[in-house]
Image: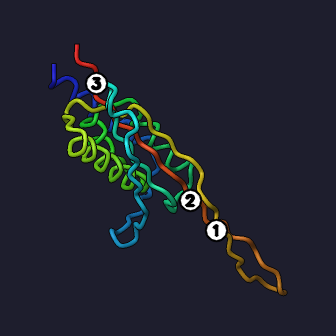
Amino acid sequence: MFFYSILRLRLFLLILYYTSPRHLSFIGKGELSFMIKKIKNENLEKSDKEAKVLAQHIRMSVFKARRVIDQIRGRSYEETLMILELMPYRASYPVLKLVYSAAANASNNMGLNEADLFISKAEVNEGAITKKLRPRARGRSYLIKKTTCHIKIVLKEKAKL
C-alpha cells in the first residue's frame, strides 16, 4: 500500500517536472533574507491545535509563490516535504523553510507529532512594492516595480479515529 503511494507521488512529480518551465534560478543562503514571524497560537485550550507561521516581505511575485502554494495545500507534512524538495521553482525554497519552521513550532511548543501534521491553510498575500526609476535616453525614466509577498502557513494535527 505504502509502495503504491510512493509510486503515485513519483509519477505526479515527473508530470509536474515535465510540464513546468526548464529554467531554474538558484539562490544562495545569503541572498534569501526574509523575516519569519511566529504567530502565537490563540486556541491552545481547544482540542485542534495548530501551528502558524508567517514570512513577510519575501522578494518574489505573488503569482509565482501561489503556483507553489497551490500544490501543497491540504497535503500531509511528509508529502509536502517531498514535493517541495523536488520542485524546480525558486519559490519552493522559502516555502520549504516555512513548513520546516511550522513543524518545529508544532513539535516543540505544542507537543504535536510531525507524522500527524497536515497543511490546513496556506495563503500568499501581496506585500509592499518598492519602486525605482531607471534612467533612459533624452532625460526620461522608466518605473521598475519590485514586488514582495507575505506567505502564511498553518499546520494542524489529523483527527485520530
Residue at position x 56%, y 47% from top? 125
Mark 1 packing: few (<14 Cα in 10 Å), some, or many (20+)?
few
Residue 37 figure quarter: bottom left
x, y (%) of residue 138? 84, 86
Residue at position x 28%, y 20% from top? 159
Disc 1 is placed on an element classified as strand
Mark 3 packing: few (<14 Cα in 10 Å), some, or many (20+)?
some
Cα–Cα span, label 2 and label 3: 32 Å
Q: Amino acid at mark 1?
A: Thr
- Near-viewer residue (5 or 145): 145
Q: Are marks 2 and 1 in contact (CB under 8 Å)?
A: yes
The colour scheme used to paint the residues is rainbow
Q: Amino acid at mark 3?
A: Lys
Cα–Cα span, label 1 and label 3: 40 Å
Residue under numbered circle 3:
158
On screen, residue 71 above or below 125: above
Q: Earlier in the sequence, mark 1 or mark 3?
A: 1
Where residue 148 is drawn, which disc sits there?
Answer: 2
Please identify the residue farthest to the front as the structure is shown.
45
